[in-house]
Amino acid sequence: MGFNKAFTNFPKLETERVILRKLQMNDAPAMFSYFSRDEVTEFYDLATFTSKKQAEDLIDRLLFKYENREQIRWAIVLKETGQLIGTCGFHEIEEEHWKAEVGYELHPDYWRKGIMTEVINAVVQFGMIEIGLNRIEAIYDPRNIASAKVLEKNGFEFEGILKKRFFKKGQFVNGAIAAILKEDE
């Protein structure tokens, strides 16, 4: 498939419990429902949302970045209901190096149920097999133990701490980096 086909028609993926599809503007209320919760944004690089317009603006930015080949961010929707419960995808795509960074968030009602493990597995498989990525990285707040665990379950190896990597919410914070390589798949 390669990068060209990944950015020609938005890829739809499926796991046992969810469908990964292109975000739509009508996903904004559901996105607002979880980004308006402090526990979701605690380790995220966004402030807690206070209006649905912020969710609409985020969806606009994510779709714009897809159109400009900068990232692919899937809506995570439950098969049973079609309800948006989070997003996951690749950003910091570097075609010349065959690598990307994965990022994700999930509504707290669905934490600790194995859903994100399913989702990341599908996204990593797509990245390695369909796009041909050689390396997928994740950079996360080292205090986010749940994120570290879901990455480990998907074969990511912890590589180290990037000291004061981010300026978030008025302070410098460390970033942990983990990665999976094609040869490890």
Image: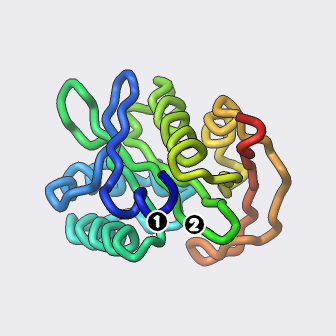
Q: Which kind of residue does numbered mark 2 sit on?
A: Ile
**Which color scheme did the rendering employ for the protein?**
rainbow
Disc 1 crowd rating (10 Å Cα; few below 14, some 14-19, many 20+) is many
Residue displayed at 44% across by 68% down: 47
Tell me the tag on residue 159.
none
Which secondary structure, mark 1?
loop
Query: Where in the figure is residue 8, as x and y percent of width and height?
Result: 34, 62
**Mark 2 highlights which residue?**
93
Q: In which quarter of the image is residue 52?
A: bottom left
Query: Where in the figure is residue 50, as x and y percent of width and height?
Result: 29, 66
Q: How far apart, in angstroms, are the residues tagged by discs 1 and 2?
A: 6 Å
Which secondary structure, mark 2?
strand
Residue 79 placement, left or right of 91: left
Looking at marks 1 and 2 on the same chain, the residue that comes earlier in the sequence is marked by 1
Numbered-mark total:
2
Residue displayed at 73% across by 61% down: 175
Between residue 155 and residue 105, name the one nearer to us: 155
Q: Tags 1 and 2 in contact by the CB under 8 Å rule?
A: yes
Residue displayed at 50% across by 25% down: 114
Residue 129 placement, left or right of 63: right
Q: Is residue 57 above or below residue 39?
A: below
Q: Which residue is at the far left?
A: 26
Q: In which quarter of the image is residue 82?
A: top left
Query: Where in the figure is residue 36, as x and y percent of width and height?
Result: 33, 56
Residue displayed at 69% across by 52% down: 134
Query: Where in the figure is residue 102, as x and y percent of width and height?
Result: 57, 53
**Mark 1 highlights which residue?**
71
Q: Is residue 76 above or below residue 59?
A: above
Residue 181 placement, left or right of 160: left
Q: Which kind of residue does numbered mark 1 sit on?
A: Gln
Q: In this view, does 105 lie above or below 64?
A: above
